Amino acid sequence: MSRSTELHRLIKSMTKAEKRHFKLGVARYSKQGSNNLLRLFEVYDSLKSFDEVRLLRALKDESFVRHLATVNLQLTNAIVQSMHDLHARDHYLSQIAENMFAARFLNDRGVRDVARKYLKKATSLAHESSQLTLLLCVTEMRRDLVVSYNIDGDDEEMSELLRLQRETLMAVNSELGYVRLRQQVAELFERSLDTRDPELQREVQQILADPLMQDIDQAPTVNSRMLFCRLKADAALLQDKPDEAYEYRLKLLDLWDGNEDDSHTSLIKYKADLLNLFSCCIAAEKFDMFEPTLQKIKALPILSRADRVKHVSSVLYAEFHYYLQNGYLDRCRDILAEIQVGIEQFGAEIPLSRLMTLQLNITVFHFVTGDFAATENCLMALTSINSASVRRDIEAFARILSPVVHYELQKIDLLESRRRSAYRYFKGQPAAYEFEMIVLKYINRLRDRHNGAAALEIFKQFDAALVALEEGLEGRAPLGLTEIRFWVESKISGKPLREVFLAKVAERKDESAGNTAAGHAADRLAPGDELAE
């Protein structure tokens, strides 16, 4: 991504108050050329989406355009300084730094008693905000002060400082351990997208056997207890235990209830945890919690462009997925336009795996409602994403759904082309794609048969093959198996696919057990796919 693109994104993420503050004080942040910075800022701000041609056209009469890269950097630095002046006093990191600077300055000038007060204030702030590395720095400064000047009562204070340092070092080691385990879990989530990894569950068990994962009470800080709950929830999802994941997500909210940190960073993490609870409500079928959690998320302020991106990629996504899973197809249609506008505006900023699941669920929606022309268009959008390294399961599903859709549209030439292409692809893969090869086999037999006894008999054999495959599965079913079975059943029964889908949703709700009806176009969130990590 170019520096110009990033600068445009930065400016568009600023609030009206932030832009006003910058414009009023721009001269303070540049020794020379403040008018150039203001002019460049206004041009960037006028572009709804970044377009380098339009940018250069707007700046064609400006002398600084020849040094645009340098002026871009100057403008970025000026914005950062301006935002620091505007927001610094509201952030605990700046408050800690200010108290540490004041203490060092006063100590150098011999005003030691006041310097100690500033250091105690910095210690309190670092401790309350769980800034462990800063806490170590502050306690070391306090120790140096006590040792250097042989202050009265130094033995008692020194003992207290040594105790605080030991506890802080233990907490730092614990948090580093949790971060290490979370990275391992993130890697396992990436691998879990391939349902054919036999070593996955064994490695999950190894992580759960780590001493840090045995008891939440051994986590020394609120932050480490939050990391513990996130790890437990992620591991439960990897083990297909959504109820357990849901319980740990609820514990996270309890921990947030006692958290007084109202910084933007904290708000981002809180929203991320709400979004993950939102997804768990769907996976664990805790539908009574879905709407309250959704309302909590929607009540949070959208402060930046990143928040707007996440609103599309996570909030609207989960809402759409919930409606699809529960057969609320009219509600799906109501928010579909908003999702598609969001993809057009923010598609380049949405994580690739999430962009693919968004497109996948839209594709499934059109497919189960019987709109095969729209499904074909969605498949074109889905396959245009460079997906192979991110979601091979989605790519596989798209490859088998394409000939099915062309069968329904009676585009025999395209059907045969897509079928042959998919066959070559699956034959060249190291993993076994038994489900996909079954679909291709029967689509090949059906291509010239759309009605009559011969087609019906092939569909019955098709269904029997899918049932046998499903009964012999170990672990998660291949993506698309549920949707293809719905389609085959609709051909055998003569009922519209939409009717079959809604009947299966109602059946699942009555049973309250088994796999989700639309769930194989489901959310498989990796820990890194959150609002901020």
Image: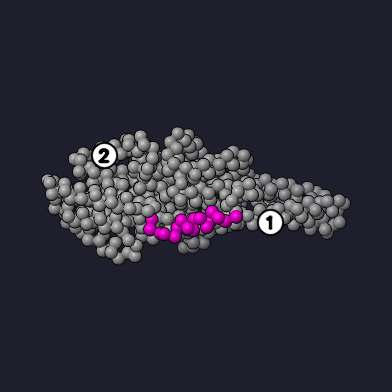
Q: Mark 1 points at which residue?
A: 169
Please, what secondary structure does the residue beneath circle 2 have? helix
Q: Give the range drawn in magenta.
A: 195-211
Q: What residue type is labelled 1?
A: Leu
Q: Can residue 293 be seen in this view?
A: yes
Q: Residue 500 carries which label?
A: 2
Left or right, 490 with reference to 356: left
Furthest residue toward right: 152
* Residue at 37 percent of width and 49 percent of height: 357
User: Which residue is drawn at the image coordinates 55% and 52% (left, top)?
Assistant: 79
Q: Does the magenta stretch include residue 197?
A: yes
Mark toward the start of the polypeptide (1 vs 2): 1
Expressed as whole percent of the image width and height from the top left, the position of residue 140 reads 74, 57
The numbered disc on residue 507 is none
**In this view, the mark in front (1 or 2):** 2
Q: Quadrant of the N terminus?
A: bottom left
